[in-house]
Image: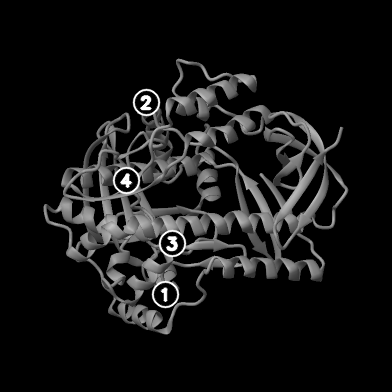
Amino acid sequence: MTRSSLRLTTTTDDRLATAIAAIRAELDLPDDFPASVEAEAQRVVEASPLPEADLTDVPFITIDPEGSTDLDQAVHIERLGDGYLVRYAIADVPAFVEPLGEIDDEARRRGQTFYAPDGRIPLHPTIISENAASLLPDQVRGAFVWQFSLGADGAVLSTELSRARIRSVRQLSYVEAQSEIDSSEGPDAASADETLALLAEVGPARRVLERQRGGASLSRPEQIVFSSEGHYALERRSSLPVEEWNAQISLLTGMEAARIMIAGRVGILRTMPAPDPDTIERFRLRTEALGHPWPASMPYGEYLASLDSNDPLQLAITHAAGSLFRGAGYTAFDGEVPEQVSQAAVGAPYAHTTAPLRRLVDRFTLVVCEALCAGEAPPPWARDALASLPKIMAASDSRASQLDNRSIAAVEAAILSDRIGEVFEASVISAKQDRGVVQIIDPAVDAECTGSLTPGERVRVRLVEAVIESGRVLFELVA
């Protein structure tokens, strides 16, 4: 993990704040919620809607990034014969959103929660997203509870979904969860929470199944912008094992949601076509040119999982693999199941259903799946909205991507703005003709660079330009 903290002059700090505010304005991101939305939120929260079914005796736990307050999911795992019983509780957001009401209307305008360097822009009023609907510890909350019976190999044997009251007993960060799991290993180790201990079995088992079905993921280090004590900072971090295991539970849920909706012939899927043969062949040739060939007998998901992002050559391959993950979108249907239902990176049909506090489409997926599992038709308000959701989510995803990329660029420029002319150690990520992209070792910055570059090389580069307002950072190769 690499963290680069800003220590800016007042002038530079002001310029960065102005640049980030400009990005938010240009993307037409909302500020506070309208008074009518807040009033409706207050009213529905005071009504305290809760399901009748009671699962508060089940010791659910939540595992999220440190400091999270909008907790969408809680998990509980126990042994079931030689397999597992997995319960996955998802925040009951539909209980707090009246169909076609003020909150619903505003959520459709936003599409998702946006994460800006100067604070997040929530999908729902915080009285809901960070309080009444959030699965906070020691609080009775309504939830959609998925229940999966898994075999010893992690394969699904049966699935159930219903609403119930739950109570999370622990809120863990990824670091805390990983530390507890790690401390439970060895002869003198303490015992981990049963759910954590079994997650360390189920997660890897599901990873094996993922590779068997042809699923794949890019394990790129994540670049995060955050604010701490009035200073902005960048952090480049790789996922902990527990994050990947936890993600496997979410993937399992999304796959089962897709299966249920396809069987019911109504719903909305997260789809992505498989890469075409020409794209695969170009990527294969790139791996050979970079000296780490992709064996013809190895599935591409297994090959990508084997890459080490700390190796400059393999990091360049990881970035080149982005060409294999294109065309993701949402596909809604009602009555006629579309021809394209698969999400190629998952290796199966898949739906977004585990983050309703932060993503609009999940609320509708949950309601549709609950009805179908009960042998009922989905409510008309949910069914009527399906056709409009792909366009809403595409626009929202585009704004989120622009916000993320432009914010990172502005902060990177601010970090480097007083270092024009300095020389840095870097790795070449990609190159074309007389320029490419390099990753600076310290600080954690990716930027354009001019010169004759070869992907995977370690090079020395000189900073030529760093403009906070545009986020433009440019290096040149040092011979």
Residue 23 lies, with reference to residue 75, above or below; the image says: below
| Upstream in sequence: badge 2 or badge 1 | 1
Q: Secondary structure at mark 3?
A: loop
Give the position of the N terminus as an image quadrant.
top right
Pointer 1 residue? 127
| Upstream in sequence: badge 3 or badge 2 | 3
Pointer 3 residue? 112
Residue in the picture at 43% in, 31% down: 275
Q: Secondary structure at mark 1?
A: helix
Q: Disc 2 residue type?
A: Gln
Tell me if mark 4 has few (under 14), some (14-19) or many (20+) residues whose alpha carbon lies within 10 angstroms of its own.
many
Is 172 left, or right, of 316 in this rendering? left
Q: Disc 3 residue type?
A: Gln
Q: Disc 4 residue type?
A: Thr
| Upstream in sequence: badge 3 or badge 1 | 3
- Residue 78 falls in image quadrant: top left
The numbered disc on residue 253 is 4
Q: Disc 1 residue type?
A: Ile
Pointer 2 residue? 212
Q: Secondary structure at mark 4?
A: helix
Pointers 3 and 4 in contact (CB under 8 A)? no
Q: Is residue 258 visible?
A: yes
